[in-house]
Amino acid sequence: MERPGRAGPTPHSPQRGSIACHLSNSVSAATHAQHPPQGGGRAAVMAAPLRPFRLRRPGSAQKFGAAAGSLRGLLRKGCRLLQLPLAGSRLCLYEDGTELSEPFFRTLSPHTELVLLRPGESWTGCCGDVERFLVALCSRTDAVVEAARRLLQDERAPRRQKLLADLIHNMSGDSAAERRDEDGKWFEGLESRFKNKSSYMRYSCESRIRSYMKEVSNFISNVHPTARDAYRRILELMSDKLKSVRYNGSYFDRTEEEAAVRLCTKEGWFSCQGPFDRDDCPCKHSINPYTNRESRILFSTWNLDHIIEKKRSVVPELAEAVKTRDGREVNWEYFYQLLFTVDNLKLVHIACHKKTNHNLSCDKTKIYRKRKQSREIS
């Protein structure tokens, strides 16, 4: 037996709900089809044993118990209990909004949670409750955080402790504040020279890029002696380029006007870009280090991951290109892009940072400049 459609005026609302529940109801429905109730119509329904159910109204957390042996009987009791008109009212599953029919009602397990709808109302499932909860959560942040802190004081269940702690962590703080005198706690442990959040975040990004430049410079001991002078000249060109763009510190700076050169929203939210071998983050990781001190510290564990690996591929390939250039000009800007820009960098949560061999190499067609554009580095 197929489940009836959703409750609501639109027949094509999206299907939601637990797979387990769907399977359970499908099995029950099949069993009912194979072994239908004995006896005829109304008499069989009247003889059905009473089963308990939990009723609620859409948008309300309050639940009421009612027992009935038929859909019509439960609907009548529910309307009387919740003071709704019987004509035009319907019952549907709280979980996904499936509207009940008499045959489907007989497949339900006792204590199934149902929503009672008056004429003209609709229900698309508990996801709607989550949406309303999120709206209320974001509109009353301070009150929610305070309530969560009170609950956490007496909570002993580890899972609930984790949920409450995460809620407090993600909602506390003042992400809109920018200056040190507006949110002093955010700056605890930082040098006094940082007067606003964006300046520190820019410095944080610059430090990462500087460390990459240092690794490239330190690799010179592995470069063939005859090619080291040319390698040094490329390092100088890269260094000058980085200084001109302030080491791409704008990637972490939410005050940067040009969205294309920052990795966050204007509010300071960063989203994980997923592992090197995926187009997005499967876990939808996100963080706002501008919110509070803890988030700022946690963000330091996020990585700017090189898609084509810096140590295994890019730097060794640069050294080899300088060694075997044979009168050709090394396309240092290509290597610059791979080492220091989002052309080859992905911002990833620590769980999405795969440290295995990426097995990716540089584009051989871009290592040297074309002859007609050549200006040899000797």
Image: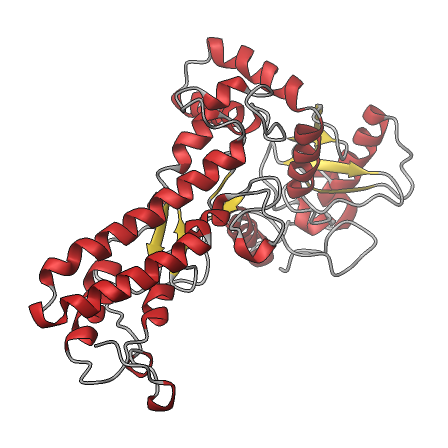
Q: Which of 59 and 307 is in front in this view?
A: 307
- Outermost residue on the left side: it is 225
Indicate the quadrant containing the N terminus: top left, top right, bottom left or bottom right.
bottom right
When asked about the image quadrant of residue 190, the answer is top left
Q: Where is residue 12 in the image (x, y as percent from the top left)?
A: 74, 61
Residue 309 visible in image: no
Q: Position of residue 74 (x, y in %)?
A: 76, 34
- Relative horizontal placement of residue 153, taking residue 276 as reference (left or right): right
Q: Which residue is drawn at 44% across and 63% down?
A: 279
- Relative horizontal placement of residue 184, taking residue 12 as reference (left or right): left
Q: Position of residue 106 (x, y in %)?
A: 65, 45
Q: Which residue is drawn at 46% across and 45% down?
A: 285
When asked about the image quadrant of residue 188, the answer is top left
Q: Which residue is drawn at 37% across and 91% down?
A: 372
Q: How many marks?
A: 0
Q: Residue at x 53, y 55 (%)?
A: 261
Q: Nearer the viewer, residue 315 or 120?
A: 315
- Outermost residue on the bottom side: it is 372
- Above or below, comparing residue 339 to residue 376 in the picture: above
- Relative horizontal placement of residue 87, taking residue 11 as reference (left or right): right
Indicate the quadrant containing the C terminus: top left, top right, bottom left or bottom right.
bottom left
- Above or below, comparing residue 57 to residue 224 in the picture: above
Residue 213 visible in image: yes
Colour scheme used in the picture? secondary structure
When asked about the image quadrant of residue 307, the answer is bottom left
Q: Position of residue 49 (x, y in %)?
A: 65, 34
